[in-house]
Amino acid sequence: MSDAARPAIDVEGAAAPPRRNGELVFQEPWEGRAFGMAVTLGDARLFPWEAFRRRLIAAIAEGGPSYYENWLAALQTLLVERGVLSAADIETRLRQFATGERDIVHPGAS
Amino acid sequence: MHDHDHGHTHEGELSPAQLRTAALESLLVEKGLLSSDTIDRIVERYERDIGPMIGARVVARAWVDPAYKQRLLSDSMSALAELGIHMNNLVVVENTPTVQNAIVCTLCSCYPWAVLGLPPIWYKDPAYRSRMVIEPRVVLREFGLELDESVEIRVWDSSAEQRYLVLPERPPGTEGMTETELAALITRDAMIGVAAVAAPAPMR
């Protein structure tokens, strides 16, 4: 089903994820979670994939530390811009997780 | 897990990216926008299905459009580009009633992933990699592909510079099908060359 609105992961170019002989390579579990989150939300049409892709390319252009850290930054920017999540809620949750005030339940965090 | 060596930071062993990923995921789950199971399923689908769908689209186009098929066989790079696929090292090899093609990578596990996605586990198995060259007819039989003795088997050894894709034969009984319906019949294994494309189940 070709549909421009749905996620199409770049195979080459700046926005293409790292691969080893074609396989998506996740160095750590959180990278897979971050990948899956963006694709799931794109699949559910929460945003047009192209909108995410543009922010990913922008994050890479700014020279972020790694491909999936750029991916994560792009996802957060898009979600905040679109009013899906508030920056304040994200910062609160980050602090709660960092201090242990709230437990991280998902294995993706480990 | 308490790790007081990291001072006040309770989850000191987690990187900022891990924390951020967990924060976004938990907030999105709370809002009912996704579930952790959905993420798992999507990642798995990307690993398994999306790749072969691209190859299937190419094969279906070649089946319905003879001119496209000629371009695909003679100049795959531009033929793939017509479908928005950018790959410059693919050779497409066509099966006929007298020739069965199959691909292997004897050295490692080179694979035309841009059109087929992830290689199956067995593709990387040393036994497949060596036996496919030594006794392809036996290996294909083990895959359930019985070939007449008169059918010539051509095994293509992939490398980093050159990848192969098998153009399987269009099965009988598919004359009235659309390109999209045809694409749904085409399997990853048929494009590796270890299976034939099965004719569609009779209409109910």
Image: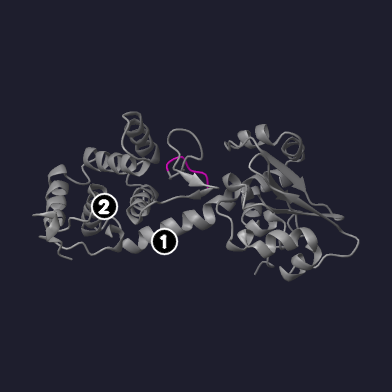
- Spatial distance from mark 1 to mark 2, Cα to Cα? 20 Å
Residue with the mark numbered 2: B18
Please give the chain letter of the residue carrying mark 2. Answer: B
Side of A36 where B199 appears, left or right: right
Q: Quadrant of the C terminus of chain A?
A: bottom left
Label number found at residue A65: none
In terms of secondary structure, where does tag 2 sit? helix
Residue found 30% across the figure and 43% down from its top: A75
Residue stretch rendered in magenta on the structure: A1-5
Q: Residue furthest front?
A: B5
Q: Is residue B158 magenta?
A: no
Judge depth for marks 1 and 2 and give the one in front.
2
Side of A102 where B64 appears, left or right: right
User: For residue A77, which quarter of the picture?
Assistant: top left
Residue found 61% across the figure and 56% down from its top: B184
Question: In this rendering, do the residues under marks 1 and 2 share a single chain?
Answer: yes
Side of A24 where B136 appears, left or right: right
Residue found 36% across the figure and 58% down from its top: B39
The 10 Å Cα crowd at callout 1, few under 14, some 14 to 19, many 20 or more, is few
Above or below residue B19? Residue A80 is above
The 10 Å Cα crowd at callout 2, few under 14, some 14 to 19, many 20 or more, is many
Query: Pointer 1 and pointer 2: residues touching (CB < 8 Å)?
Result: no
Q: What amino acid type should be assigned to the residue bearing mark 1?
A: Arg
Please give the chain letter of the residue carrying mark 1. Answer: B
- Name which of mark 1 and mark 2 comes first in the sequence: 2
In terms of secondary structure, where does tag 1 sit? helix
Residue with the mark numbered 1: B41
- On the image, the x and y values in percent for residue A2 come to 52, 44
- On the image, the x and y values in percent for residue B173 come to 76, 60
Q: How many marks?
A: 2
Above or below residue B109? Residue B150 is below
Using the image as rendered, state which of residue A50 and residue B105 is in the foreground.
Answer: B105
